[in-house]
Amino acid sequence: MLVRKLRLQRGWSQEHLAELVGVSVRTIQRIERGYSPGLETSKALASVFEVDVSTFISEESTVNKNENLSESTTVADDEKEAMLYVKGIKEFYEHLIVYLVFAVVFGSLSYDRWGATNFMILGLAGWGVGVVIHGLAAFEKIHFPGLGASWEKRAVEKRLGRKL
């Protein structure tokens, strides 16, 4: 959660952070989900975010033991909740976009043109395209306009009622 908070404060995408740190986007995604980064990744994250490396080596024990950490290097419970809430909304919007694309393509191509078998095959093919689009969005290989890091940051701040 801390990496996500620091990334959102700067308005960076996961892809941008991965480039800065020199790791894959998947690594950033895992760290944001709670997996501990390795020592080299922790050092790179600390350098990029300009914080002490101990911030990433053991987030929970460091936060509990070291009260000299600034507010920007800790994640409060309400911030975690807000970030998860916004992440869920973002995933919903992405899923909705996939559904709408599927509905438009499927509906326009199948309207009174083919029998039930072709209708089913077209439906499966269309849904397959939707799954591919959803997968590409989930792994941030494609980006939906308006749902980037800046939107995520604004939505988290709106949910919190304060700056992140």
Image (spheres, grey):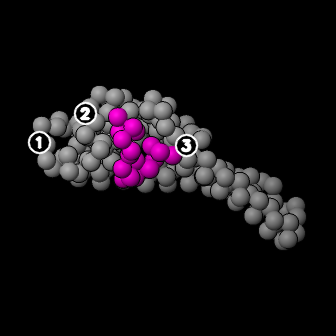
Q: Is residue 121 visible?
A: yes
Mark with earlier residue (3, 1): 1
In this view, the residue in front, 98 or 110, is: 98
Most common secondary structure along the magenta stretch: helix
Quadrant location of the C terminus? top left
What residue occupies the far front of the structure in this picture? 39
In this view, the residue in front, 80 or 101, is: 80
Residue 96's tag is none
What residue occupies the far right of the structure in this picture? 114
The kind of secondary structure element at disc 3 is loop
C-alpha span from label 3 to label 2: 28 Å
**Do tag 3 and tag 2 residues touch (Cβ < 8 Å)?**
no
Q: Residues within 10 Å of mark 2 (few under 14, many from 20)?
A: some
Residue identifier under label 2: 52
Between marks 3 and 1 in the image, the one whose residue lies nearer the viewer: 1
Residue at figure coordinates x 85%, y 62% from the top left:
112
Identify whether 126 is placed above or below 23.
below
User: Which x, y percent locates residue 22?
Assistant: 48, 33
Q: Residues within 10 Å of mark 1 (few under 14, many from 20)?
A: few
Q: Is residue 163 visible?
A: no
Identify whether 112 is placed above or below 81.
below
Residue at figure coordinates x 88%, y 69% from the top left:
115
User: Which x, y percent locates residue 28?
Assistant: 45, 43
Residue identifier under label 3: 140
Mark with earlier residue (2, 1): 2
Kind of residue at badge 3: Glu
Q: How many numbered markers are drawn?
A: 3
Kind of residue at badge 1: Glu
Residue identifier under label 1: 67
